[in-house]
Image: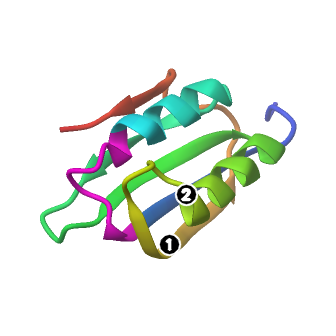
Amino acid sequence: MAAPGLWAFDYEIYGDVQGVFFRKYTEEQGRKLGLAGWVRNTPRGTVTGQVQGPKDKVEIMRNWLRSVGSPMSRIDRAVFSNEREVRALEFTGFSTKY
């Protein structure tokens, strides 16, 4: 049986998001909210990842990714895709992929 209210989405953040501790702050925010997922830099200069957890916490993380980020970052655009309900968390904790 599916756990009630577990949601997931993929994201890609555009702007000045590399070399400004964006991944570190994203990982910290994900852990603070008790979410599962990951974050990584791309060769295109963006940051991508996935978030999974209770829908209310996932929405807090979406807003954080769209408008807060790290103190030195500049977020120009946030693209969210593959939003879906999940039966169970696919990751344990929130981590940075290299």
Q: Nearer the viewer, residue 53 or 46?
A: 46
Kind of residue sitting beneath label 1: Ala
**Above-or-below relation of 94 to 78:** above
**Above-or-below relation of 2 to 8:** above
Q: Please say if the residues under marks 1 and 2 sit with CB atoms less than 8 Å apart.
A: yes
Q: Which mark is residue 78?
A: 1
Query: Which residue sits at x=79%, y=35%?
Result: 2
Q: CA distance from mark 1 to mark 2?
A: 7 Å
Q: Position of residue 7 (x, y in %)?
A: 71, 48
Q: Position of residue 37 (x, y in %)?
A: 49, 37
Q: Position of residue 21 (x, y in %)?
A: 31, 43
Q: Nearer the viewer, residue 94 or 84?
A: 94
Q: Is residue 22 magenta?
A: yes
Query: Which residue sits at x=20%, y=67%?
Result: 45
Q: Please, which residue is most extreme toward the right here? A: 4
Query: In this view of the protein, can residue 90 be seen by the observer?
Result: no
Q: Which quadrant does the C terminus fall into?
A: top left
Q: Position of residue 52 (x, y in %)?
A: 61, 41
Q: Which residue is mark 2?
A: 65
Neighbor class of circle 2 (other Cα within 10 Å; few <14, some 14-19, many 20+) is many
Q: Quadrant of residue 12?
A: bottom left
Judged from the image, the secondary structure of the residue bearing numbered disc 1 is: strand
Q: Please, which residue is most extreme toward the top here? A: 92
**Above-or-below relation of 71 to 15:** above
Marks 1 and 2, the one that precedes in the sequence: 2
- Left or right? Give the position of 47 relative to 64: left
- Left or right? Give the position of 83 relative to 71: right
Q: Please, which residue is most extreme toward the front here? A: 72
Q: Is residue 2 magenta?
A: no
Q: Which residues are magenta?
A: 13-23
